[in-house]
Amino acid sequence: MSYHHLTISERIRIEVLSILGYSTRFITKFLHHHHSTIARELSRNKFENNYCSTFAHNNYLKRRKFSSYCGKYYELLSNIISKKLHENWSPEQISNALLNGKLSFKTIYNWIYTGKLKGVSLKNLRHKGKRRKKETRGK
């Protein structure tokens, strides 16, 4: 049996069966989930000492929303970096002097490559996105 999240219909069934007084073991046989999953669901989502499926599902959605990492990007920081890049600052200078190393210069380059910084392209960089050519002397 592989892991999957409880759906709203399964939560409604849990609510009905718990109101009718069935045990968590019986509910697990009915829903084909592990008994600890049902017990955790019942204890985690009590509303006035009763399980409420809509309350439980709303809490689940709220927890899922804040469970993932959102990153360091935000609009004000983006505007500051864009302004400095237009003033011919390098991402290394921005990272070290302006942001005191709180944001890596590699992150700034990645934001430029992915287009997260509005109005900034490789042409705004000092070397215009060109890489140094390999020296071929003596070969």
Image: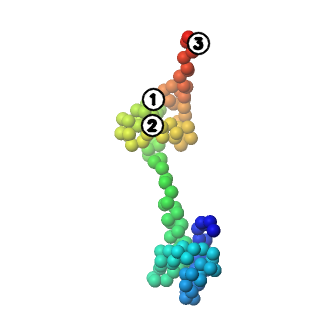
* Residue that numbered label 1 is attached to: 88
Q: Are marks 1 and 2 in contact (CB under 8 Å)?
A: no
- Residue 139 tag number: 3
Left or right: 100, with 135 as reference point: left
Decide: is 65 above or below 74: below
* Residue that numbered label 2 is attached to: 105
Q: Which of marks 2 and 1 precedes in the sequence? A: 1
**Please, which residue is most extreme toward the bottom here?**
20
The kind of residue on which mark 2 rests is Phe
Residue 24 falls in image quadrant: bottom right
Q: Is residue 45 visible?
A: no
Q: Quadrant of the N terminus?
A: bottom right
The spot of residue 10 in percent (x, y) is 61, 75
The kind of residue on which mark 3 rests is Lys
Give how far apart the Cα atoms at labels 3 and 2 are.
Answer: 35 Å
Give how far apart the Cα atoms at labels 3 and 1 are.
Answer: 36 Å
Label 3 Cα crowd, 10 Å radius (few <14 / some 14-19 / many 20+): few
Which structural element holds mark 2? helix
Q: Quadrant of the C terminus?
A: top right
The spot of residue 16 in percent (x, y) is 59, 84
Q: Is residue 24 visible?
A: yes
Q: Residue at image x 43%, y 39%?
A: 104
The kind of residue on which mark 1 rests is Asn
Give how far apart the Cα atoms at labels 1 and 2 are.
Answer: 15 Å
Q: Residue at image x 55%, y 76%?
A: 35
Which structural element holds mark 3? loop
Label 2 Cα crowd, 10 Å radius (few <14 / some 14-19 / many 20+): some
Q: Which of marks 1 and 3 precedes in the sequence? A: 1
Left or right: 27, with 91 as reference point: right
The spot of residue 79 in percent (x, y) is 46, 42
Q: Marks 3 and 2: which is nearer the front?
A: 3
